Structure formats: C-alpha cells, structure tokens
C-alpha cells in the first residue's frame, strides 16, 4: 500500500511580477505540510491551480537558479532538518471529466490536484472498477503515477492511459502514454531516470463497468470471507478496504506517519529458497521473471521490531511497515530509526529493504 505525492522537479525563485500575481509565502515550516510532522522551513511556497500558473512560476524560478520541489498532499514526503532553500509549488489543479464512454468502460481525465480518495469515491458511486481497492489512500491524483501507487492487488499502472505534464527540459506541456512511464513495483520514470524533469498536471484513467470479482488480494479476500460476503459490489469492496486500512494504518492527522514507510521487498528465487529454509511459512507472491515479493512488515516483525520505539519513532504494532512519529523532533531521529531497522532486517535475513517516501 502506498501514499501519494506529486513528482519532484529541480528548478528555482520568484520575480517581483510573479510574487505579485501568485501569492508566494516565505519561511514556511515544512512540518506543517508533511504528515510525518518533521523538517525545517521552505524559503518560498506557493500554490498553482492551472497549467499556465505552473509554467509561469516554474519558468521564473528557473531563471533565478533556485531549486523547486513539487508537493501534493505531503503524505509520502519527508522534509529534512535544513528545510528547503528554494520554492515549493503545491499542485492544486482541479478536474474530473468523462472523456470516453463505451459499452465496457469509461475514460476519465483528472486534475493532478484532486484529492485521491474523493476521486475513488466518485468512481465507485459511478459503479466503475479499477481503483476501488486504492480507497482511503491519502494524497493527490498527481502523486499516483510517481510511485505507481497501489493497494490490495490494484495499481495505477493497470488503469492509467496517459498523463499530461510540464516538461522542464522542453518548457512545454507534454502527453505521456502508459508505456512511456516505466511503471514497475512502486516505481516509474518520475522517481527514476526522469526524476526532476516532469510536473504531472493531469491523469487519464480507463475504468471498467464490470463488477469487481474474486479472487481478491489475500488480506481483502480474508476480510470478506470472515464476514460471509458473497456479493461483491464496488461499494462493498471500497468499504472493506477502508475498514482494513482503518484497523492497520493510523490516521496521520492523529498520529504523524507517512503510511507505508518501507516498500515490500522484491527478491530473487534463490533468496526465497534461503529464506524458506528457516522460515517455511514466510508469505510470498510471485512477480514473474524469477522474482518474488515478500511483505517487509513480516520481515520487520520477525526481526523482533514489532512495536519497538527507536529514536522517537514507533514501529506500528498492527502494521510494521508503518513508522509513527511518537516523540522524534528531527529528521535525524527518523533517519537513525530507519537505518537501524534496515540494518536489523539485513543482518537477520540478508535482504535489503528500502524506504518508500520521497525526501525534500
């Protein structure tokens, strides 16, 4: 499972003209705009609601040689103690438009600034399938393609047809097709080889008019089976996912966290065989090409870290992928906790786990 945040872009500060036109704020505490509630100040921050506003403020920043960071909901981002010396642009571009409709599907174009879960709810109300198991993920639409967000067997790559983005190299709005986004598990070109190049402004999804159908992802199927659910509507699946997430994932408004802090581990078949030799019950999911996904929460729990308090960060006792900021006051505290957890898993299982949230 994932949380959403828009893509990172390198760029720069605002001229007086743009300052007057765009309401740019100074010395803004990043801890107030990120759900882990850590980090220093941003030198400048602004919001954009149209592609033209984005282009103007980005161009202006670039001419003045300051870095730019594009921020969505702040739910999958960690801010460092030194803050950010450039311009934070918060994407608030709206939009929800049906642009295609046939016997089996609807195609919907979404503004990058739309709240993700509100979009999921709206598509469920329209009786459309494709993103219903990604209910209750915090963040914005523009963040979904960046890390190929997914949950309970669905990911954005399954339904994304194309997206539009500001290309900072060519200084124009471009359209990228699904095949050009380089999607893989929790990854895309936007946090890989093209990191720093694009700012996503809209996303186009093709959703099915068919009902959801089993078998579902293991945890979701178990929840439904335990309740004797045999009729699977879009709303039934959404409600089930929301209930599961509410039980396993703390509300960041109450307990500061970034959702899943670690990616699930992707290992080779020889690593799985080695792991199974001492842990025959280890859950695993075949990914193809001789690779398998291992729940990192299982690795952390079985490395005796469940519920541990490390440098003010609590490993959540219901979902070991989640780190809760219980008493940490600095990014350094978080980094120390992260590194200890990664080291303990590596020493125990010879598996290197990775952080999921991006960093400012």
Image (cartoon, rainbow, N blue to C red):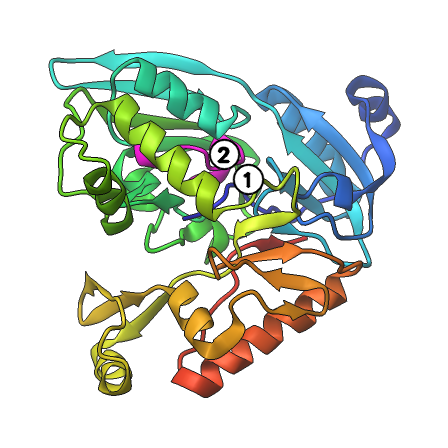
Q: Residue at x 45, y 43 (%)?
A: 247
Q: Is residue 93 above or below residue 71?
A: above
Q: Residue at x 34, y 39 (%)?
A: 156
**Res 232 → quadrant:** top left
Q: Position of residue 223 (x, y in %)?
A: 27, 42
Q: Residue at x 78, y 21 (%)?
A: 22
User: Label 1, on which residue?
Assistant: 6
Which mark is on residue 184?
none
Query: How many numbered discs, if any?
Result: 2
Q: Is residue 192 rendered to the left or right of residue 13?
A: left
Q: Is residue 225 magenta?
A: no
Q: In this picture, which residue range is highlighted in magenta?
A: 131-144
Q: Position of residue 174 (x, y in %)?
A: 44, 32
Residue 87 visible? The answer is yes
Comparing 129 with 161, the one in front is 129
What is the CA distance from the residue labelled 2 to the residue labelled 1?
A: 5 Å
Q: Is residue 237 rendered to the left or right of residue 286?
A: right
Q: Is residue 93 above or below residue 189?
A: above
User: Label 2, on which residue?
Assistant: 142
In primary-sequence order, the first of circles 2 and 1 is: 1
Q: Residue at x 30, y 39 (%)?
A: 178
Specify the farthest residue to the front: 227
Q: Position of residue 15 (x, y in %)?
A: 84, 31
Q: Is residue 133 magenta?
A: yes
Q: Is residue 330 above or below residue 249?
A: below
Q: Position of residue 58 (x, y in %)?
A: 68, 35
Residue 201 visible? The answer is no
Q: Are marks 2 and 1 in contact (CB under 8 Å)?
A: yes
Secondary element type, mark 2:
helix
């Amino acid at each position: 499972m994932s949380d959403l945040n828009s893509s990172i872009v390198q760029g720069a500060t605002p001229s007086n003209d743009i300052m007057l036109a765009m309401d740019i704020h100074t010395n803004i505490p990043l801890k107030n705009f990120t759900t882990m509630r850590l980090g220093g100040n941003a030198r400048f921050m602004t919001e954009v609601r149209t592609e033209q506003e984005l282009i103007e403020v980005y161009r202006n920043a670039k001419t003045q040689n300051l870095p730019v960071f594009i921020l969505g909901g702040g739910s999958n981002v960690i801010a460092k103690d030194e803050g950010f010396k450039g311009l934070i642009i918060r994407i608030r571009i709206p939009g929800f438009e049906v642009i295609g409709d046939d016997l089996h599907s609807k195609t919907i174009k979404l503004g990058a600034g739309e709240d993700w879960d509100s979009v999921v709810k709206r598509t469920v109300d329209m009786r459309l399938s494709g993103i219903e198991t990604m209910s209750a993920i915090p963040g914005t639409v523009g963040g979904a393609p960046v890390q190929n967000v997914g949950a309970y067997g669905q990911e954005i790559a399954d339904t994304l047809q194309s997206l539009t983005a500001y290309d900072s190299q060519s200084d124009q709005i471009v359209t990228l097709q699904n095949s050009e986004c380089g999607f893989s598990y929790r990854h895309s070109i936007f946090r890989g080889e093209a990191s720093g190049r694009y700012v996503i402004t809209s996303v186009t999804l093709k959703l099915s008019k068919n009902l959801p159908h089993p078998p579902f992802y293991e945890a979701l199927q178990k929840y439904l089976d335990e309740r004797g659910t045999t009729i699977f509507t879009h709303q039934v699946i959404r409600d089930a996912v929301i209930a599961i997430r509410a039980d396993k994932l703390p509300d960041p408004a109450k307990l500061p966290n970034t959702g899943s802090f670690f990616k699930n581990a992707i290992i080779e078949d020889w690593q799985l065989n080695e792991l199974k030799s001492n842990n025959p019950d280890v859950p695993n999911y075949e990914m193809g090409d001789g690779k398998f996904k291992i729940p990192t929460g299982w690795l952390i729990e079985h490395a005796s870290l469940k519920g541990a308090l490390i440098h003010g960060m609590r490993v959540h006792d219901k979902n070991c992928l989640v780190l809760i900021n219980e008493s940490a006051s600095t990014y350094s505290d978080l980094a120390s906790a992260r590194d200890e957890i990664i080291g303990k898993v590596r020493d125990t299982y010879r598996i290197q786990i990775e952080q999921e949230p991006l960093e400012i």
